[in-house]
Image: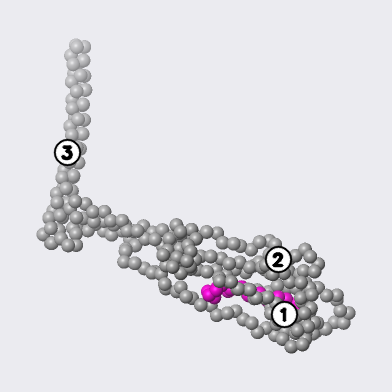
Amino acid sequence: MFQMKKKTGRLFNQSWVARHSPIRLQITFEDVFGNKISHVLEYVNKGYPLEEKKDTDILFLHADTTFDRNRNVLRVSPTNSERELVKIGGYTVTKPLLRSFVYNAIKTGITEQLVHENTDTTKGTKVWALIDLSCQIVYAFKVLFYTIPTVSAQMGYVKVNQYEKPQPEKKPIKPANELEKLPEITTPYENEFPQDDEFDDNPQPLSTGQTTASNAQKSGANDGIGILVELNENMKKVANSLDRLQSIDNSLARLADSFEKFLQHK
């Protein structure tokens, strides 16, 4: 928990101290003779529900950060305006904008044009227009969504619906030459948190005496335990014998009562 606060400067829901590894608690009991028994309890944090794709999303991208267990999302959704095509995050793409990208592609020969780029301290977004020079249209958007640093990234495509008047002449399709790829993923938090400890996963057997005790002390403790066990068994036998004596006494009382009634009858 303190490592996270040191790195991020903040700590959402500070009661979640088991984010990166389970909390293990060893409970040890010791009697007056120095005998010990212990048990290890383990708590695993199940986390909280993450954002998912909605029915209105054309494209849903998410970039998760494992360190603070946070999900960054990017949603691409349609618009109701005739001038606008789609909304990518907080950025809206319009039809006049696409015509400018087609013009630049014809002029430069670069068929993958950068449409939008946005970054903050935790995440980044890049959008490219894919242009068909043969038909002179934008036929799709390529969207990259990633974390900073790039511990997670996703890339997806959004089809562009027809925004120009259909041309009477049929032309062969010429896909764009795509150059941008997924960035290399880094793992800055790998093996930063302990994965094991010195505690046993199973309950420890009863130990006879403390580790610092001498052999004589351990032997004396064992003798004491043996005496207690034997005494307990003897007490059980005595209790059973008393129960049997009580049963015999009850039987004799019933026999005497019957004999007395027999004599009175005679």
**SS at circle 2:** strand
**Location of residue 181 by image quarter:** bottom right
State the SS at label 1: strand
| Residue that carries the numbered disc 1 in the rendered image | 130
Q: Look at the image and say whether residue 17 sits in the magenta stretch.
A: no
Q: Residues within 10 Å of mark 1 (few under 14, many from 20)?
A: many
Q: Position of residue 189 (x, y in %)?
A: 46, 73
Q: Which residue is mark 3?
A: 238
Asked if residue 149 lies in the magenta stretch, the reply is: yes
* Mark toward the start of the polypeptide (1 vs 3): 1
CA neighbours of label 3 inside 10 A, class few (<14), some (14 to 19), many (20+): few
Kindly check if marks 3 and 2 are in contact, taking CB atoms under 8 A apart as contact: no
Figure quadrant of the C terminus: top left
- Name which quarter of the figure residue 19 lies in: bottom left
Out of 163 and 230, give the one closest to the viewer: 163
Q: Is residue 21 visible?
A: no
Q: Which residue is mark 2?
A: 77
Q: Secondary structure at mark 3?
A: helix
Left or right of residue 171: residue 232: left
Q: Position of residue 230 (x, y in %)?
A: 16, 47
Which of 226 and 182 lies nearest the eye of the viewer?
A: 182
Q: Distance of mark 3 from mark 2, alpha carbons?
A: 84 Å
Which residues make up the magenta segment? 138-154
Q: Residue at x 42, y 63 (%)?
A: 1
Instruction: Give the Cα distance between marks 2 and 1.
Output: 18 Å
Q: Amino acid at mark 2?
A: Ser
First of labels 3, 2 by sequence position: 2
- What's the residue type where badge 3 is placed? Val
